[in-house]
């Protein structure tokens, strides 16, 4: 199904009956990657999922969004669906959006589930800064060596050859958006989350390492962290049986 929000066509699905749940995918992913969660919950809940702007079958933003812009669009989606209360489940970048929604629009939130969530600036040691400086020096030399190529083409070739995987996979406006979102730190918001929060993390996650989950557990007042052994960044897929039991126990337990 499609709906237009802020001039963008947004692709979404809605299945099941019961309390409202919204599942948000991560950066570089799409709705299909979270369908196992949707299918798991559709027998007990009214479940929504969407392709975030610029992913899957949803149109790209016309401007360089940041994470708060994504949260605003998701809130408009929630309003358009006529939802007054909702449970948020966010994986990775979807978790980051969930954090923003829960602190900016607390009146609509029931519970939150953050799966290998983004939102914290990673620890950066000497190795990281040496890599950054080497990358910048290489970029400078590349521009000199290939001086006959037009600047835009030159930079594009460089990033395709030497850039990060996410950066190489992004183009145009989505590349600018990626630069915006990776440098945001939501740690100050965590203390303002006042809802029951389940944190699920893979102990072998290298994209949003486990220490980030431990920080979130410490900062979010009513939260608990469950670690899935042997699972990576897509912990819900790597250890789906255990994930399913934990998620359903959390969501189907009524708050006292």
Image (tube, grey):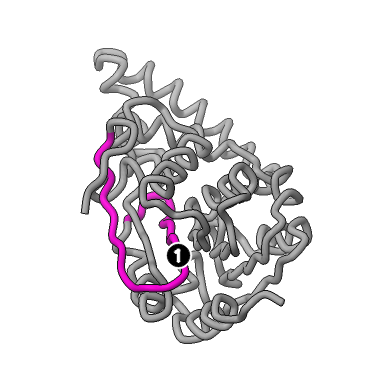
Name the side, left or right, on which 164 lies relative to 151: right
Residue 137 at x, y percent in the picture: 51, 26
Q: Is any atom of residue 229 visible in this view?
A: no
Q: Is any atom of residue 2 visible in this view?
A: yes
Residue 13 lies in quadrant: bottom left
**In this rendering, is residue 161 above or below 50?**
above
* Residue picked out by circle 1: 20
The magenta-colored residue range is 8-30
Residue at (47, 38) in percent of width and height: 72
**Relative depth, front residue between 166 and 249:** 249
Helix, strand or loop for the magenta stretch, by majority: strand
Residue at (42, 79) in percent of width and height: 44
Name the side, left or right, on which 50 lies relative to 105: left
Residue at (65, 65) in percent of width and height: 197
Name the side, left or right, on which 22 lies relative to 148: right
**Relative depth, front residue between 255 and 100:** 255
Q: Quadrant of the C terminus?
A: bottom right
**SS type, badge 1:** strand
Residue at (63, 69) in percent of width and height: 198
**In this rendering, is residue 55 above or below 39?**
above
Residue 203 at x, y percent in the picture: 60, 72
Residue 37 lies in quadrant: bottom left
Residue 161 at x, y percent in the picture: 33, 38
On whether residue 15 falls in the magenta region, the answer is yes
**In this rendering, is residue 22 above or below 162?**
below
**Relative depth, front residue between 137 and 255:** 255
On whether residue 236 falls in the magenta region, the answer is no
Category of crowding for the residue at label 1, using alpha-carbon neighbours closer than 10 angstroms: few (below 14), some (14–19), many (at least 20) = many
């Amino acid at each position: 199904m499609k709906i237009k929000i802020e001039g963008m066509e947004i692709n979404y699905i809605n299945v099941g009956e019961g309390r409202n749940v919204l599942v948000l995918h991560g950066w570089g992913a799409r709705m299909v990657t979270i369908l196992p969660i949707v299918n798991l919950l559709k027998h007990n809940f009214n479940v929504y999922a969407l392709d975030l702007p610029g992913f899957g079958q949803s149109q790209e933003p016309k401007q360089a969004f940041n994470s708060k812009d994504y949260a605003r669009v998701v809130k408009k989606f929630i309003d358009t669906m006529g939802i007054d209360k909702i449970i948020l489940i966010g994986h990775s970048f979807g978790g980051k959006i969930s954090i923003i929604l829960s602190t900016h629009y607390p009146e609509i939130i029931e519970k939150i589930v953050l799966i290998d969530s983004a939102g914290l600036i990673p620890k950066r040691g000497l190795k990281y800064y040496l890599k950054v400086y080497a990358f910048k020096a290489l970029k400078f030399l590349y521009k000199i060596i290939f001086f006959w190529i037009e600047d835009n083409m030159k930079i594009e070739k460089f990033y395709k050859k030497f850039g990060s995987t996410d950066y190489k996979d992004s183009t145009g406006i989505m590349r600018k958006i990626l630069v915006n979102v990776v440098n945001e730190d939501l740690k100050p918001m965590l203390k303002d989350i006042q809802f029951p929060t389940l944190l699920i993390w893979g102990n072998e996650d290298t994209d949003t390492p486990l220490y980030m989950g431990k920080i979130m557990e410490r900062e979010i007042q009513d939260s608990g962290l469950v670690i899935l052994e042997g699972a990576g960044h897509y912990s819900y897929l790597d250890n789906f049986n255990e994930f399913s039991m934990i998620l359903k126990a959390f969501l189907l337990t009524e708050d006292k």
